[in-house]
Amino acid sequence: MEYAAFLRKHIEEVTPLTNEEFELIIPYFKLIEIQRKDYLIKSGKKVTAEYLVLKGLLKAFMHDDMEREHIIQFAMENWWISDYPAYRIQSKGELCVQALEPCLVLELSLANKQRMCEAVPAMYRFHGAKAFGGFVALQKRVLSLMKNSAKEKYELLLEQYPELFQRVSKTMIAHYLGVSRETLSRLQK
């Protein structure tokens, strides 16, 4: 399994595992390859899994009543993505998750996540730390959207994730920041 070393390193950034524990964990994940523009999650469909990106780039987004796209999250290598409210209760989601590049991801169903954590209790610590980190990042993003100017939001994103600007279009950056494409062009000058 070519992804085993990646997965182990990812987990052990949070919590150490024995070889025996790691061997128990591997079968709970499913390797999925998707092409650019393919969907992992479509709005209105039941969400049963979350995904760890091994290679590639994805976006989580929704369309409003005016059919404007709002990008909630990008996920590149070593990041997790899903429609988490729907995943948590195994219901129909509001978000779409789409590949922006050819992607290799590890799928983890909620049922497998629960079984894995029962089999290897250290995984409770791992998932708790990842969830807390995700909550902190989301809260910072919401506060930034509420209090920062368009210029400040742009500069913060550029400072935090400069590689994102090489991988996605200016239109997608604008959708993520909640500004028009024209405003983004002015900010870049």
Image (cartoon, helix red, strand yellow):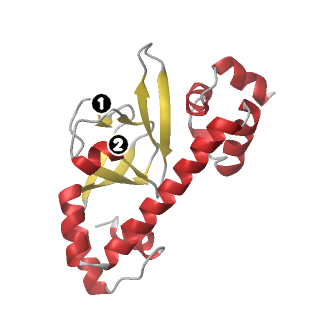
Crowd class of label 2 (few under 14; some 14 to 19; many from 20; radius 10 Å): many
Q: Secondary structure at mark 2?
A: loop
Q: Is residue 12 above or below residue 132?
A: below
Q: Which mark is residue 83?
A: 2
Q: Earlier in the sequence, mark 1 or mark 2?
A: 1
Q: Residue at x 81, y 27 (%)?
A: 189
Quarter holding the N terminus is bottom left
Residue 153 sits in quarter: top right
Q: Amino acid at mark 2?
A: Asp
Q: Residue at x 31, y 51 (%)?
A: 50
Q: Is residue 27 above or below residue 134?
A: below
Q: Residue at x 30, y 30 (%)?
A: 43
Q: Position of residue 77 (x, y in %)?
A: 48, 54
Crowd class of label 1 (few under 14; some 14 to 19; many from 20; radius 10 Å): some
Say which of 98 and 5 sits in front. Answer: 98
Q: Residue at x 28, y 50 (%)?
A: 88
Q: Secondary structure at mark 1?
A: loop
Q: Amino acid at mark 1?
A: Ser
Q: Mark yes or no: residue 72 visible.
A: yes
Residue 42 sits in quarter: top left
Residue to which mark 1 is pinned: 43
Q: CA distance from mark 1 to mark 2?
A: 9 Å
